[in-house]
Amino acid sequence: MKHLIDKAEVLIEALPYIRRFFDKTVVIKYGGSAMADEDLRASFAVDVVLLKYVGLRPVVVHGGGPQIATTLERYGKESKFVDGLRVTDDETMEVVEMVLGGRVNREIVALVQRGGGAAVGLTGSDGDMIRVSRRIGKSGDLGRVGRIVGVDPASIEAVIAGGFVPVIAPIGVDEQGVTHNVNADEAAGAVAGALAAEKLILLTDVEGILDEAGSLIRHLAGEDAARLVEAGTIREGMIPKARCAIEALKQGVRSAHVIDGRTRHAILLEMFTDGGVGTLITR
Amino acid sequence: MKHLIDKAEVLIEALPYIRRFFDKTVVIKYGGSAMADEDLRASFAVDVVLLKYVGLRPVVVHGGGPQIATTLERYGKESKFVDGLRVTDDETMEVVEMVLGGRVNREIVALVQRGGGAAVGLTGSDGDMIRVSRRIGKSGDLGRVGRIVGVDPASIEAVIAGGFVPVIAPIGVDEQGVTHNVNADEAAGAVAGALAAEKLILLTDVEGILDEAGSLIRHLAGEDAARLVEAGTIREGMIPKARCAIEALKQGVRSAHVIDGRTRHAILLEMFTDGGVGTLITR
Amino acid sequence: MKHLIDKAEVLIEALPYIRRFFDKTVVIKYGGSAMADEDLRASFAVDVVLLKYVGLRPVVVHGGGPQIATTLERYGKESKFVDGLRVTDDETMEVVEMVLGGRVNREIVALVQRGGGAAVGLTGSDGDMIRVSRRIGKSGDLGRVGRIVGVDPASIEAVIAGGFVPVIAPIGVDEQGVTHNVNADEAAGAVAGALAAEKLILLTDVEGILDEAGSLIRHLAGEDAARLVEAGTIREGMIPKARCAIEALKQGVRSAHVIDGRTRHAILLEMFTDGGVGTLITR
Amino acid sequence: MKHLIDKAEVLIEALPYIRRFFDKTVVIKYGGSAMADEDLRASFAVDVVLLKYVGLRPVVVHGGGPQIATTLERYGKESKFVDGLRVTDDETMEVVEMVLGGRVNREIVALVQRGGGAAVGLTGSDGDMIRVSRRIGKSGDLGRVGRIVGVDPASIEAVIAGGFVPVIAPIGVDEQGVTHNVNADEAAGAVAGALAAEKLILLTDVEGILDEAGSLIRHLAGEDAARLVEAGTIREGMIPKARCAIEALKQGVRSAHVIDGRTRHAILLEMFTDGGVGTLITR
Amino acid sequence: MKHLIDKAEVLIEALPYIRRFFDKTVVIKYGGSAMADEDLRASFAVDVVLLKYVGLRPVVVHGGGPQIATTLERYGKESKFVDGLRVTDDETMEVVEMVLGGRVNREIVALVQRGGGAAVGLTGSDGDMIRVSRRIGKSGDLGRVGRIVGVDPASIEAVIAGGFVPVIAPIGVDEQGVTHNVNADEAAGAVAGALAAEKLILLTDVEGILDEAGSLIRHLAGEDAARLVEAGTIREGMIPKARCAIEALKQGVRSAHVIDGRTRHAILLEMFTDGGVGTLITR
Amino acid sequence: MKHLIDKAEVLIEALPYIRRFFDKTVVIKYGGSAMADEDLRASFAVDVVLLKYVGLRPVVVHGGGPQIATTLERYGKESKFVDGLRVTDDETMEVVEMVLGGRVNREIVALVQRGGGAAVGLTGSDGDMIRVSRRIGKSGDLGRVGRIVGVDPASIEAVIAGGFVPVIAPIGVDEQGVTHNVNADEAAGAVAGALAAEKLILLTDVEGILDEAGSLIRHLAGEDAARLVEAGTIREGMIPKARCAIEALKQGVRSAHVIDGRTRHAILLEMFTDGGVGTLITR
């Protein structure tokens, strides 16, 4: 009986958070180990479904770099990178769309549904959702790589209104309707901004944002985060994530969280415990 | 971290129950030790608030026998009982209404609000909610004691629609609008029936319904419960509770639970764990 | 037939007022003789029900000083007054709540329902409706006496939306949820302000506000009323009523009426005849 | 003051009727003296507006025989009658439509608006409202005279939904969209049926339905009315009115009233006093 | 088959216009040859119905000068003109109302319904729609001729909300509810302004607005139109139409069209082809 | 001008069809030449957008056999057929999902959007839309090939409610959430049934259903179609299409159309001209 009561206490501890976030939108950037490891995948799915059932509106935006690389390889198509960005010719873009929209997105929809939720997959080109202009690299043309210039949330909202969890593949469309590859972190940030989300949660493969001594920074004001980025204090791989968090806060998102996707139930822990498990960035 | 993940697992374990009961009405008969002990009171309040926040519609019906007895004593008013029912003359009824509607009901509203919920107290005479005819005892007149003949749930539904937890004092009105004392268990059952509730939970001061050997019966079909009542197998004090559970099931309530209110978080344990903590009666 | 036609003419005379007040909220402070005399009580009830049926939204706020005094006496509890305000210790407050919420409020709900309406009783602590800070007397502590700092009308609006007449007992809650005694006139004024009522009607035991010569003042601008209060021209007992009328006008109520509750159907006469029957205070 | 209180009592006496008819539809056939006499016209208008404001949904259907006759005369157009029905050739029909839709209907709309209401005039051809087949007289062709075969209430309901009192001219359309003259009583009855009205009120120039001795029959069951019609006991001019009342009751109208339009405020008297002022026919 | 495909192409060509005007209001001033010629009448009706079915909200405002003249003549009533405006005494006004509201309006309602639509006829006095003050001529009293001072669109909107095409006769009411004759072009412009219409279409008996050389001006900015009116360059008969177009644009209408009602399907051509068929005036 | 008027006449000719199909759902099976030829693709897109704008609710279900074959080839994956059905092992299914959901579906969404519409792509696994059981071939296991057992239209309806054209890839899920390949014709028929569609349109590469003499059958009752299928009279390739049309009619679809997708604007021609362009099958 003692054991059972302890369980109830955990539910009770979560109550203030459940109340605070009731009816709020949470955009989750899903990727990395949390997407690769079978056990973590299942843990992610139930986390999302739980958010839904305790009254939040979770929205999932995913990446798919590794799956794209594997498939390109299988096709015998060589990958070329300029300034760290994949040069995306038409043939590559075809593979990107097939892998993101036809495989990764579908797997996540299936995952959430196995976890007990009802999900609908969307691609950034549905309803002209993610609008881009072509990104010009410093050292030459990158092909169909886009910079997000706007997000029309109508298709996402239709899916939420139907009671579903939207799962979004990061594809952008330019004014001519031509699809482009977009960075998934950036897409998650822009979607969170367009939905006026309460939270943007970025699942990563590190503990969070680390200081120079390598210790986790638990809480950071948006402007301090900006200063760290400029000062180059932040680990390089973290910079795009920090930038998109900062940008999302500017667009009205209440808080951004960089958390460790290698931890089971990282999302629940971040949302429903005081300490949280990563770095919280607030306005 | 391990500790935190265990906590998340508890939330996850509750998920199937949260999903199953989403948007369902649960009527809780509140009384006994759960109402007398300070610690149990607080535990009851957060349980109710949690139900609200994970998407259920809790409705509280309370009794108040001990408080009535104390106040009558303070007034120097002697209590008379016939067939185990308090003879309720007009003066007594005035005290009953003051204590139930003006004290017990108010304390429970305050309790739920301290627990983080928003509550509104109702009395069975609000909106002519609980309709009664006068109950005639076998051995003579009982005064203003009512037998419930119907429940108009409109006032309860108005309060729920406003986002509040209704807390209901068991007073009935007859056709002339005269108030009567009604049994709180019976009131809870009739309210559950009128609201087509998913569950009726009766908080008691015993483990649940016991068999002849004194062991807890975990699960009972409604008709078996009826047979036990007739056979006189059930402990006497439990008979009215069993009867009102059986009656509520007949009126369309999905299940009735007789649980041990002396256990902290008994409601959550009954609703969100497989074993439960008392006797479950189903149709 | 002539007699019948005269009756119809009366209905017709009321028409312009019915049209003007259609769908408007009217807060009525109920107390004094209108609450004590059986005949006046019945007349009050049908007045309220008629307002409801011709399309207004009546809200009743009541006091209960005499009933509290009687009950305290019965308990052998001595009343202490400081600066004209009852010192309210915990024991006294318990009686105040029982009498206001469990007796007076219930009687008015029953009264309105006997008059043909559907009513729901509320207490200022329902849904944390009437918020107070502790009022400190000039000559020492008054105990649980509150000064109103805000009114959350959500619970009142839920009850109105359900089609009921709300009947409100003047209890306030502080930030810790502790209940306090509040002045009923003040409560009525604050409720009228929070509901952006069209009218605040104060039923008193005098003709209205009198001038120095003792003649009834029929119409008064809010600022003139304020000047009279400051000049001390107004009879002392009327000062709190005048003050709460002035305050309500400041909070957006369109007009306040101090009328003679000893007259049968005083509310209808004030609302549906040109002359009215008391003092009208407008912005 | 006594006088004022008497007035309030009249309002109070009307209360049970106001409650009973709240939100109900009342179709009034308007014609005869009530339409000819200036004073009665004004009394009719305020009656209709009062009905509206105390929560009913009045619908006016009017005739216009005398005005048609006058205009035809002015045109030098001779009227021909067959079986007591006006033979309606195309030229006559043109006058009928102009007088009913362009004059009588407009005057009633203006009348109601001067009385304080908002009205919209409709003709039975708006939205193909009143559908007719051509009525064949016993002794030959009557021209464009229609027998009502159905009523589509959509246009009436649109006008009510907009908050207006519909005022309807009795014109019918056949399947080809050709307009026909229809009897106004019959139109009122059919409209009442299609709207599932609570009441059909026929304003006439007699006291009501009289028995053989010439005394007013106060109350009549529908089947008894039918028997009187068949037995020929009813005065001839009253037969079409009785027939349309009987028909309306069959189509679901709750009661039909044949009242004396020469009495001021006849509608209010019939609706808001016990005795009423004419003959009430019920199912 | 080629022929069929050509047909489909026409539908396709209309698509961008259908999309642009979706859910927009179009007010059409109907009169002149388009109302006199049987073939053009039928073409007008289907145009209006098509607008309705491809998602617009057409509103028809009509005149009726010739019909009024004919009827007055038939009555032997001489017409008197002052400053080009018909002097409208009470007898004349009675004819005006009968002809406009009881004949012309009814014919147009029937016309639209034969074309497959559902229409409801309104007069400017319904719901006090078109408000006027009396227009004083330069050379003396004109009688009941009104200058529009405001339009209350509530009755029009009720009819649209019911799914009907409103057909409006140009009658105005002054503050006393007295009806006045108003210019139909002016009425159409004021109605378009009050409805915040997308377009005002004036059907005329000329090609459009002509320049000094007599050539059609295809497009005109509102201010240029104003300049032409002042300079007297525009043909006299066109001046009131130009003025009401300019006024409507000022009140927020997006564009005004003066088109040739002698062309079959002129409305469709103007709305669904690039060139259009008359003069387009834009802000 | 004559040319323009002819254009307007075409719009007018379409009017009766537009009216008849207003607010109705039309499911279009898209495939074959209409999907392969650039010109036909554009014609298809504007047809769909036009349907949307004239008030219908088009839903597109597509196939993708050729694209799947090409991609499998590129992967060096050999295709195996049993009983004419592709044996679908896990690796094949991965390609099927990528091609259908990530390429073909995306191209059609882009196509409709370039045509001026707003589209959202769905896969039969979104919201567990298309439910299947595993199809067992006569001559052995076919792998992940499904037989449709039900369609949950909730996700389709959410997308329509948001104002979008749903474009659906024919993937099914079994009870374990495992995706299966389903026949696109069958999917279109089942979707039409679940949406209670007005029409099911099957775009094919033949004129329609031919009789034994090879002539086009213009109209066929459902039962006659069934007889032809059984008699083997119908060309083999047409049998599955005929079967799914028959099945859809049974599930409540009003009519099914087998039309020639090689004709430009075949959909518009079939819907908006009397003769139509293929075979119409009705209940």
Image (tube, coloured by chain):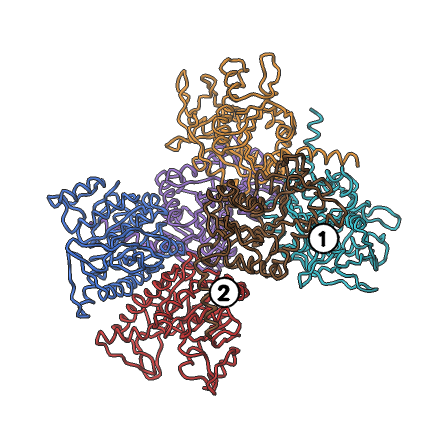
Chain colours: A orange, B cyan, C brown, D red, E blue, F purple
Q: Residue furthest left?
A: E213
Task: Name which quarter of the figure residue D184 lies in.
Answer: bottom left
Residue type, mark 1 in image: Glu
- Would you place residue B146 above or below residue B115 in this image? below
| Residue C223 rendering spot, x and y as whole percentages | 46, 42
| Residue C145 rendering spot, x and y as whole percentages | 65, 39
For label 1, the residue is B97
| Residue D70 rendering spot, x and y as whole percentages | 27, 75
Residue occupying image coordinates x 27% and y 44%: E249
Which label number is shown at residue B1? none
Placement of the C terminus of chain B among the 4 image quadrants: bottom right
Q: Nearer the viewer, mark 1 or mark 2?
A: 2
- Would you place residue B263 above or below residue D208 in this image? above
Placement of the N terminus of chain B among the 4 image quadrants: top right
Gap between marks 1 and 2 measured at Cα: 41 Å
Task: Name which quarter of the figure residue C12 lies in.
Answer: bottom left
| Residue C282 rendering spot, x and y as whole percentages | 46, 47
Label count reads 2
Q: Look at the image and tell me whether residue A81 can be seen.
A: yes
Within-10-Å neighbours for mark 1: few <14, some 14–19, many 20+ = many
Q: Secondary structure at mark 1?
A: helix
* Circle 1 chain: B
Q: Which residue is more in the foreground, A264 or D241? A: D241
Q: Which residue is more in the foreground, A114 or B64? A: B64
Within-10-Å neighbours for mark 2: few <14, some 14–19, many 20+ = few
For label 2, the residue is D3
Q: Residue furthest right?
A: B213
Q: Is residue C217 left or right of residue B82?
A: left
